[in-house]
Image (spheres, helix red, strand yellow):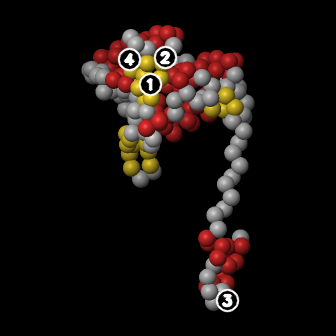
Amino acid sequence: MLSQALNHAVATQVLGRNVAQFVKPPRPKRKDISPLTREGVIKLLGAASQTEFYYPLLVAIYTGLRRSELLALTWADMDLEERYLSVNKGIHTHSSESERIQPPKTDKSKRLVSLPIDLVLALRHHRETQEAIWDELGKSMGMGDRIFARPDGSVIHPDSLSKACVRLAKQAVLGGSTFTLSDTH
């Protein structure tokens, strides 16, 4: 409001310049975010169990990976025998272009993440299911293919994962509380 008034004063030549344009607005307060409880995790995964978002959410819960890291994972990034995955890239989108795969912003973000045996077994099942679907479509799955893709192999957009998470949380009756999967593991 003040800036608009000063802009008007500059336009009518009452002032020489609008000094308010150099002031940075205060940052909005962040909502309190808390990790999901054990009960919340069970409810969320139950709601997601028959969707394409089940496995990405499962891995996010176990590992704390960011959505961009999760959705960029390929089968080459995962060693199910040695029980680890390599975080070495992220999928980034901008409104003016399609998604881009980029390395992490810092070297610290590149890391190996250990996988518990329960998650390894679930991911083996996911791979078998994904391979069967792709076989039906006449496609073969390779190490460079994304772990978390739509049944036809197309990319799951990071915003789609976020929106699904909110929708599934409502469906699982987790209330309106804001939660984070990265702190849940």
Mark 3 closeness class: few <14, some 14–19, many ≥20 residues within 10 Å: few
Q: Dot 1 corresponds to which residue? A: 112
Real-space Cα separation, disc 2 to disc 1, in angstroms: 10 Å
Q: Is residue 34 visible?
A: yes
Q: Dot 2 corresponds to which residue? A: 115
Left or right: 167, with 133 as reference point? right
Q: Dot 4 corresponds to which residue? A: 79
Q: Horizontal and vertical percent for residue 86? A: 41, 26
Mark 1 closeness class: few <14, some 14–19, many ≥20 residues within 10 Å: few
Left or right: 56, with 79 as reference point? right
Real-space Cα separation, disc 3 to disc 4, in angstroms: 69 Å
> Which residue is more in the foreground, 153 or 33?
33
Residue type, mark 4 in image? Asp
Q: Which dot marks residue 14? A: 3
Decide which of tag 4 and tag 2 comes sooner along the chain: 4
Which residue sits at x=36%, y=22%?
Answer: 75
Real-space Cα separation, disc 3 to disc 2, in angstroms: 66 Å
Which residue sits at x=47%, y=23%?
Answer: 113
Give the quadrant of the N terminus: bottom right
Real-space Cα separation, disc 3 to disc 1, in angstroms: 61 Å
Tag 1's secondary structure? strand
Q: Horizontal and vertical percent for residue 65? A: 52, 29
Decide which of tag 1 and tag 4 comes sooner along the chain: 4
**Can you tell which of label 3 and label 2 is closer to the viewer?**
2
Residue type, mark 1 in image? Leu
